[in-house]
Amino acid sequence: MARWIAEWHPDDPAFWESSGKRIARRNLIFSIVAEHLGFTVWTLWSIVATKMGAYEFTTDQLFWLVALPNLIGSVLRVPYTFGPAKFGGRNFTVVSALLLLIPAVLLAVAVNNPGTPYWLFLVIAALAGVGGGNFASSMANITYFYPRNKQGVALGLNAAGGNIGVSSVQLVMPLVIGSLGLAAAGWFWIPFIVVAAVCVWFFMDNLTSAKADPREQLAVAGKAQTWIMSFLYIGTFGSFIGYSTAFPLLSKSLFPDAPFAAVAFAGPLVGSLIRPVGGWLADRLGGAPVTLWNFAGMGAGVLLVWAASTSGSFWLFFLSFQLLFLTAGIGNGSTYRMIPAIFQAKAVAERGESEEALLYGKRQASAAIGIISAVGALGGFLINRAFGMSFAAAGTPAPAFLAFGVFYAACLALTWWCYTRKVGVKVVASLAHARV
């Protein structure tokens, strides 16, 4: 069944109202469904690791199982970025969804054998990283479907729908595992994955205008803006995915008798639902000012969590962590809105206000989104390894929290220097026009 759309002009108001909006919405809905399942598989080990007491692994070993999917997922986001442009958005989404079956089945089989070695669990956890790659291809694809002035909300909704997959895992899996056993953590998702792949095949589209030469797309790797935004995205999305996957195991280590499994889903849910608000605020106020003040909030949040971790009160710790999830979610939306604004504004400045320039800017933004999301996802790995090493070296997460606070201060300074001070705005050139 061929579903290639040759004529696509979302920045033309007449085209958008007549047919573009309906088609874009349909693709967004099923993109969210597939991406949601990608996040569920990607973050399964955040719960599975807390249920592996029978294997007598150390806290540091368990944090490795939680961290590895984040590392592999971040690496896979680079090739996944170019998948929609090479093979078509619908086609690549089907394949990326079906690949989720591999880590789900292997997890279910491995935990049924009490003699499964630790190294094999590491391999299976690493394979769960394919779910993290889905985010880059999904976002790169949806970028093409929406006009410039609606990308903040559209990308925010797409990302939020995927991010909620973390919350789904942490809400549903403790109940499923408690009722059906640890192997059900893998088997449970298989029918959902198959149904999602079938729906994507029948209801999504490929865009001819999204076809691009990977070498042209890779050119964005040589642009300073790509790496500046990558650094900032480590601070926002890296924090979201890192804290989301680390929270259950961190809570178990600090408060063994607390009901952390019953409430672990709340933080990822808050961060996911608030993400479109971050995109909306960036559409209205500009991404850079929102991002700047948000990093100040993240710095305050990590200090509160640090203090709460030594208070002896799980509920104070839990509530303090919600501020980190809230600010990480807002920052996810605002930084992601900055990316298309930057690259499309630069394309217009270089090539003029034309449809060709806008399309070129979207291709550049699509490639940049993949690279930036890949680097940003490394934050999930780094946060989990920071906690693991902190416990191994000091028996406490305090050194990790100190490092996070210093990093947020660096992100705030970089945002101010590059995007909000007057000289920085001039250096970026014409980006203020795009409400960066």
Image (cartoon, grey):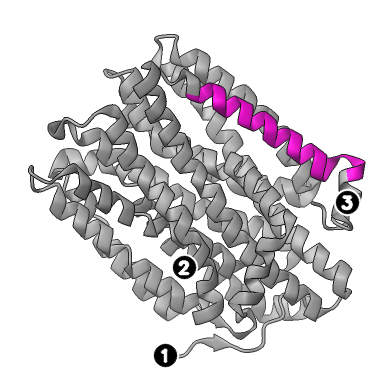
Residue type at mark 1? Met
Report the residue marked by disc 3. Answer: 427
Q: SS of the residue at dot 3?
A: helix
Magenta region, mostly helix, strand or loop?
helix
Residue at the spot 54% in from the left edge and 67% down from the top edge: 81
Quick one: which residue is furthest to the top in this view? 311
Disc with the residue nearer the chain's start (3 vs 2) = 2
Q: Are marks 1 and 2 in contact (CB under 8 Å)?
A: no
From this viewpoint, is residue 165 visible? no
Q: Position of residue 333 (x, y in %)?
A: 63, 48
Q: Are marks 3 and 2 in contact (CB under 8 Å)?
A: no
411 part of magenta stretch: yes
Q: Nearer the viewer, mark 3 or mark 2?
A: 3
Residue type at mark 3? Val
Q: Give, as a single range, the part of the protein colored magenta.
A: 400-423
Q: SS of the residue at dot 1?
A: loop
